[in-house]
Image: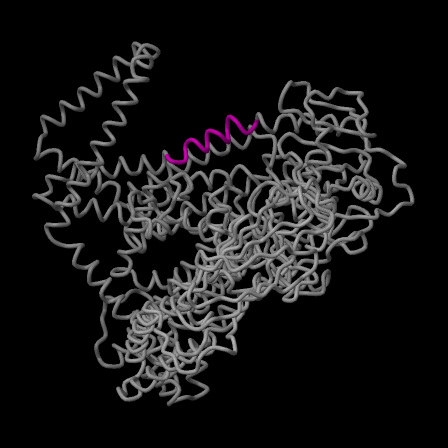
Amino acid sequence: MAYQAPAAGRVAVGWLGDRLFLGTTSGLGADAVLRGDFFADDLTQGAPTGRSRWTRQHAQIVLPNLGSGADLELTLVVQGWPTDVLNAPVAQPLVQVRADGSLLGSFQPTGEWVSYTFRLPATVRIAADLKIDLDINHTFTDTATFGADARPKGVRLAEVRLQALNENPLFTFYPPAQRAVGLLMLGALLLYLLLSRWLRATPLVYALTAVGVGLAGIGLAVARIWMGAILQVALLLLLVLLMLAWRRPLLLLARALVRRFTYGLALGYGLTTAALVLLGYALAELLGWLSHFGPPLFVQTFPDSLLYGLLGAGLLALGLVWGRAGLPRLADNIVAFLGSQRGAWGLLLAFGLIWLGYQAWVISQMAYVGHADYADNAVVARNLANGRGWVVDYVTQFYHIIDGTTRPQETWPLLQPLWIAPFFLLFGAQDWAAKIPNLFFNALLLVLVYQIGTHLWDRRVGLTAAIFTLTNYLFFRLTIYVTSDLAFVVFSLGAVYCLYRAVGMRDAGMRDAGMRDAGMRDAGRGGASRLASRFSLLASRLSPLASHVSLLASRIPHPASRFLLLAGILTGLMMLQKPSGAMLALGMGLWFLAQRCPPADWRDLVRSWTPQRWWRLIAPVAIWTLVALAVLSPYLVRNVWLFGKPVYSTESYDAWVLGYRGNSGDAWEEIYRVFTPELGGAGLPDRSWILRWGFDKTQEKFENQVVALRDYLLPVWHGLPPALAGLSSAHERRNIASPIGAWLALIGLVGALRFRRRLLSLLLLTYTPYVIFMLTYWRTNEERYWVMLIPWLALLGAWALWAGYAALAACGDRRWAPLGLVLVAVIVGSVVGFSRPDIAQKITREPQIWQPDLTAYAWLEEHTPPDAVIMTRIPWQLNWHTERPAVMIPNTGDRELLLHLAQHYNAEYLVLENQQRVKGDAGRLLAPLMDHSNQVGQVIEGFELIYASPTADFRAFIYRLPRGVVDGATPQTASPLNLAASPPN
């Protein structure tokens, strides 16, 4: 019946939902033209709908499930080329309109928005989906207003409309689109299954299903264009809701599968086969390495190499002599030593001394602290040590124009400088002194990971996870730079663990108290419980009131209270270290509430509601929250005092700029544009800028963040079908836990469904708000944003590794224990070795890149007065190394604006570093100044070159800025980011 009504509706091109009908891409290849893809949507002044899209030479619009039917009227709202097109062969192109391959007509657009109407006969509709093709005979690229734009643009399209013609016959049967009928039937089935899960009354389920199908039919009759396209999306939504509704049975099934596949002979045989294959692969890699490097290495180390060879032969002979009886015993003894308290602590201490000593040696050799926020932490710490407070002497962005270069630090967290300042007071403001706190936090992290692994599993897991964590290349980076992430990892890991212990101990205390009340006291519950029970018995003999007090005290074990207090302190420090930690705190709080009041108890709690009962449930959560807020309060007070709001950072503006033009170097430069309206800027970025960027770019940014997060956390799985390939990482080098470490962590995560459900629920709830925050507000495509997950990945992976060893060793009367131990050694070596190339690059290659800049900074410090203001692309590290005020090079192609800002801040010199070249519009403006053939003494466009690195390559330049060029002048044009003054998307 729905398909007896003529199809009607409109699609506003460039608005949400239009991608149901058309394809888009930013690529410039021929494939995009053949597909008929559009360019990204953008705001369009004068457009009837306010937004539009540019077509290519060929554009295609598909209206799904439209079906056959009467003749229709097709209307296209189109604008042609602007009047300032450069090098165009014609003034306006010719556009041909086709429907399912049949020519409907043609038109020549104008520079104004015009509606073009065509008759769409029913006879040309040969399929359920209507395909409308626009063929444009010419395209253009550049305009006088916006300059170069490589996109070959056809015409702008703002709207597509379909409506019925009045002369259609009244009594005619039109067959429906078969696919739409099938989708509707499948949707009805899914809706029925969903409602049957939520509702118990079968008649009500049938009635609501019928209502849903009826509404879908009405939608097909009234707005077939949209309903036909939404059917597939509705099915996906119903599937997601169905999985959520059946989540408990699905989890029970997953746990049953885990339980089934963790026991039995099949597991042993599978592990044995996998171990043999992995061992064979490792031997092949070793033999391949020996074939290339073995003979030269043997010759270079002779005669020591001969002794090593004899030692290896002796060990092999020993293994053969011991055979199947001695080797399993040896393997068991080694594993027992690793699991003993003395052995584990001894190895942990030895590893810590060696690794931290090595890191200390590397730190002592590096004459820099890092880029951006790394250098900013050191600068603020130096100013704190000098008694100046949290201030900096540089201008890095142009959201506001301030007087002078000294300002409160308003971008990054404030706690890291506090850890550094005492060491500056002791040793002076040295590069290596700024990194000493990192060594202390590494030591804390080493012990903390070991302690967590030991408590949750055993000492072998803790020891292995600690080694995995500290040898990870990201933690090595965090150590050699002055970053706030390392302390953030320690605080967040400690906060989560302490909260887990507090809830676990409190629940154990509650169970103990209940058992005592029922006369089922267990003498082996631990010292705290025994002490509480004795106090309860003594108090009951003294008075009934004291008995009640003692019972309440016994229900709140002292260790749990200590862990709860410590969790609150660490949570506050975590948020002080990085305010984004508030997202972790939110997840922790939700988990804590769920543990205090499980969903299964909600109905009983509402029925027997009393203030005292509610307070008993909420009091621990309130205490934890108040302690955390008390620790965080100085940061909130400082922000209110200085900026008028409790949470403030210029990154709240960066969030609406970064990532919307991709991840290239030019795209990153967008946050350094001049935004202040006094100089023609677009104003402060906020969430409304999503409309400026367009929905395509917003979706593209979100997809890029999802892909980046996937590549960091999920393992690579080669050979998956194309439909499932997106569920695994696409690049092994991007796995933050190493490729095999990612697999181990995934196996451990699956195992946690069966053996560590409470821990798994805590981790999922803790990090989910943070993931959502990073995906939707900030960005994920930087590894250090996820280092707080590495300890947990290492713990889960180490657990899976040693569980695999235990299962393998149990096979065949422990005869496979040696193979299991070899497997453990190979995997540990693989995980640790994954970070070696990155660490080697940081030690050998990176100092060479920094050296030209460090030499230039030394020259600048020697040849300029202390108050000389320097314009640079990296003001943070320039100020750290030279103690000169600095100002950022604005990302503008307007020379007059750049010089105006230089004059406003009294900048006298321009530094172009080797380590961070200027990109974007400013890079193109200053390109002549970065030519490696430039020589000292040259004057290039008014900039006098006064220093250049004495090398043929990797050169840094220092110029004296032109003076008097813009005296008394205000630039007439800026480089605003709003789409009214930027190239059309």
Q: Position of residue 672 (x, y in %)?
A: 69, 46
Please state which of residues 275 and 710 is positioned toward the viewer in this rendering: 710
Residue 736 rendering spot, x and y as whole percentages:
41, 44
Q: Residue 330: give x, y in percent of width and height.
A: 16, 35
Quadrant where the image shows the N terminus: bottom left
> How far across and how far down the image is residue 234, in percent?
39, 70
**Is residue 845 located in the magenta-colored stretch of the structure?**
yes
Q: Quarter of the image holding residue 297?
A: top left
Residue lying at the far right of the rendered structure: 968
Residue at position x 33%, y 47% in the image = 462
Q: Is residue 178 above or below residue 786?
A: below
Q: Going by the image, does 627 lie left or right of 693?
A: left
> Does the segment drawn in magenta span residue 893?
no
Q: Residue at x 58, y 34 (%)?
A: 432
Of 573 and 735, the residue lying toward us: 735
Near-viewer residue (130 or 544) = 130
In this view, the residue in front, 182 or 832, is 182
**Residue 268 shows up from this direction:** yes
- Whether residue 702 appears in this view of the structure is no
Tell me: 850 left or right of 776.
right
The colour scheme used to paint the residues is one colour
From which residue to which does the magenta span run? 834-847
Q: Quadrant of residue 243?
A: bottom left
Answer with the quarter of the image where residue 149 lies: top right
* Secondary structure mostly seen in the magenta stretch: helix
- Whether 486 is drawn above or below 196: the answer is above
